[in-house]
Amino acid sequence: MFKTFVPEPREPGWVLIDASGQPMGRVASKIASILRGKHKPDWTPNMAIGDCVVVINADKAVLKGSKPRTKLYTRYSGYPGGLKRVVAADMLAQKPQKALEHAVKGMLPKGALGYQMFRRLKVYTGETHPHVAQKPVKMEVQ
């Protein structure tokens, strides 16, 4: 008789990712994988065992090809005429951390588990971040 392995909940580690000069989609998929915990040998799809991720230089992440002028970010207020659209180039200029968070959120599971994973993401536009005390381990994006 085999027993099902269930990992014990434990304190998450901290990972630092530098997004400067990297394609936003590749950075987002790497971040989503780390948040889910897929880089760990005891990964379980129904548990949030991933690490906390600190992203620096989010303003220097790039979109390739025609995406800066053709990709649209859409939101709706719920009222008539409340549909707002922002071109990716404008979003990257005004709120680059929101663009990266939007990309990562779309790659995480939907529902309470995905929200729990998403809370472990910290995105900053500059080189500095307030999580030095957690000693995040630098990870490269390929």
Image (tube, rainbow, N blue to C red):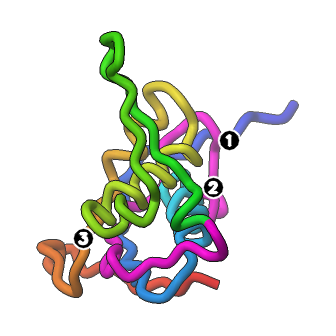
Residue 70, quarter of the rendered image: bottom right
Please give the name of the residue rendered at 50% of the width and 54% of the height, measured from the top-left corner. 103
Magenta range is 38-66
Q: CA distance from mark 1 to mark 2?
A: 9 Å
Please give the name of the residue rendered at 47% of the width and 33% of the height, measured from the top-left corner. 113
Q: CA distance from mark 2 to mark 3?
A: 29 Å
Is the C-beta separation of discs 3 and 1 under 8 Å? no
**38 lies above or below 48:** below
> Counting other residues with Cα less than 10 Å from the Cα at mark 1, is it few (<14), some (14-19), or many (20 or more)?
few
Could you tell me what secondary structure mostly forms the magenta stretch?
loop
Is any atom of residue 117 visible in this view?
yes
Per the image, the residue denoted by label 3 is 124
> Counting other residues with Cα less than 10 Å from the Cα at mark 2, is it few (<14), some (14-19), or many (20 or more)?
few
Is any atom of residue 11 visible in this view?
no
Q: CA distance from mark 3 to mark 1?
A: 37 Å
Per the image, the residue denoted by label 2 is 42
The residue type indicated by label 2 comes to Asp
Residue 30, quarter of the rendered image: bottom right
Quarter of the image containing the C terminus?
bottom right
Please give the name of the residue rendered at 35% of the width and 18% of the height, measured from the top-left corner. 81
Please state which of residues 22 and 10 is positioned toward the viewer in this rendering: 22
Please state which of residues 81 and 47 is positioned toward the viewer in this rendering: 81
Is the C-beta separation of discs 1 and 2 under 8 Å? yes
Q: Residue 138: image x %, image y %?
A: 41, 86
Question: Is 141 positioned to the left or the right of 128 in the image?
Answer: right
